[in-house]
Amino acid sequence: MFKIAIVDDEAPARVRLHTLLDDIAHEFPHEVVAETGDAQEALRLMQSVKPDVILLDVQMPVMTGIEFAKALRAASGEGDRPQIIYITAYEEFALPAFEVQATDYLLKPVRASRLLESLRRVRARLPQPEINGSDDRRPARTSFSIMERGRVVMVPVSEVLFMKADQKYVSLHTPFRSYLIEDSLTSLEAEFPDRFVRVHRNALVRRSAIAGVEKVVQSVSRPNGDEKVSEGWQVLVAGCAEKLPVSRRQWSVIKPLVR
């Protein structure tokens, strides 16, 4: 599990980071292993919690984020040192931040999509464990083996436009037809993180098949006779007439993909 530490002296800022991390949890599984508003305390914690990345403020009392990074470099070897993403309201500290080898420098308020992009950059820099006989992880499949009427049908992953959860089954939808498999949507999302993106709790769509988005306005009648109007978005899928609703939680992830 990817390990994250949050260091910011303002409690609302730490709460905001937790919210953003929750929003991207499907796209980027992680664990927050430390949280503090004191950079000196954070420095003491690093050896025990060993995070992969620190989400760090710049302007903090007693020890600034830049001073923290310098102290961390002095106290740890390069291979054991977590990467740092600065998250701050101050543009003027960007140069000093990169002089202490910051991975990224984000200005508040941070969008979930921007944080996700930055964390992916961190993960790409980390050494990748080798897959061997004792490792449970396997390369992603190139096709699905589906038992159908006494025969096995091979469906290439590249043909799947989207996947939808339906009770205990997941349906795979191609331009030609759909198929049922017993995999969970969560396991499929973990197996194909770079190919499919979650748009809703019950749907994944192939990134390259997203043709656009469309606003949806719904009017719901209330018992007292009034009408409540709600707005949302749905994804347009290339080569398919079906439109997939986008949950509010996933909108920040989908929006950058259709700019």
Image (cartoon, rainbow, N blue to C red):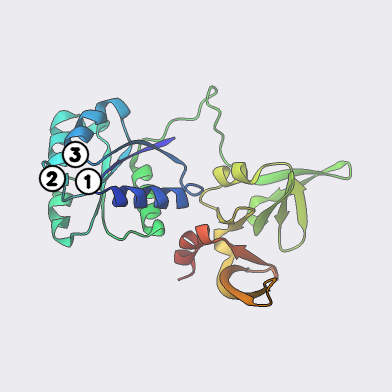
Which of pointers 2 and 3 lies earlier in the amino acid sequence?
A: 3
How far apart marks 3 and 1 lie (CA) works out to 8 Å
How far is the residue under mark 2 from the one under mark 3? 8 Å
Q: Amino acid at mark 1?
A: Asp
| Residue at numbered disc 3 | 39
Q: Residue furthest front?
A: 224
Please tell me how crowded label 3 is: few (under 14), some (14-19), or many (20+) other residues with Cα within 10 Å.
many
Marks 3 and 1 close (CB-CB < 8 Å): yes
Please report the residue visible at 66 percent of the width from the left and 54 percent of the height from the top. 163
> CA–CA distance between discs 1 and 2?
8 Å
Say which amino acid is labelled 2: Pro
Q: Is residue 135 left or right of residue 163?
A: left
Task: Tell me the quarter of the picture where residue 187 sits.
Answer: top right
Q: In the image, what residue occupies the spot 37% across and 58% down?
A: 114
Q: Residue at x 20, y 39 (%)?
A: 38
Secondary element under disc 1, as helix, strand or loop, is loop
Residue receiving disc 1: 9
**Number of residues whose C-alpha sits closer than 10 Å to that of mark 2, classed few (under 14), some (14–19) or many (20 or more):** few
CB-based contact (under 8 Å), mark 1 and mark 2: yes
Percent across and percent down for residue 113 are 41, 58
Amino acid identity at mark 3: Ala
Q: Residue 46 at what x, y percent from top left?
A: 25, 31
Corner quadrant of residue 199: bottom right
Task: Return the residue nearer the eye: 201 or 97.
Answer: 201
Residue highlighted by disc 2: 61
Say the numbered circle drawn on residue 47. none
Q: Is residue 40 left or right of residue 153?
A: left
Q: Sequence-wise, which precedes: disc 1 or disc 2?
A: 1
**Mark closer to the chain start, 3 or 1:** 1
Determine contact: label 2, label 3, CB under 8 Å.
Answer: no
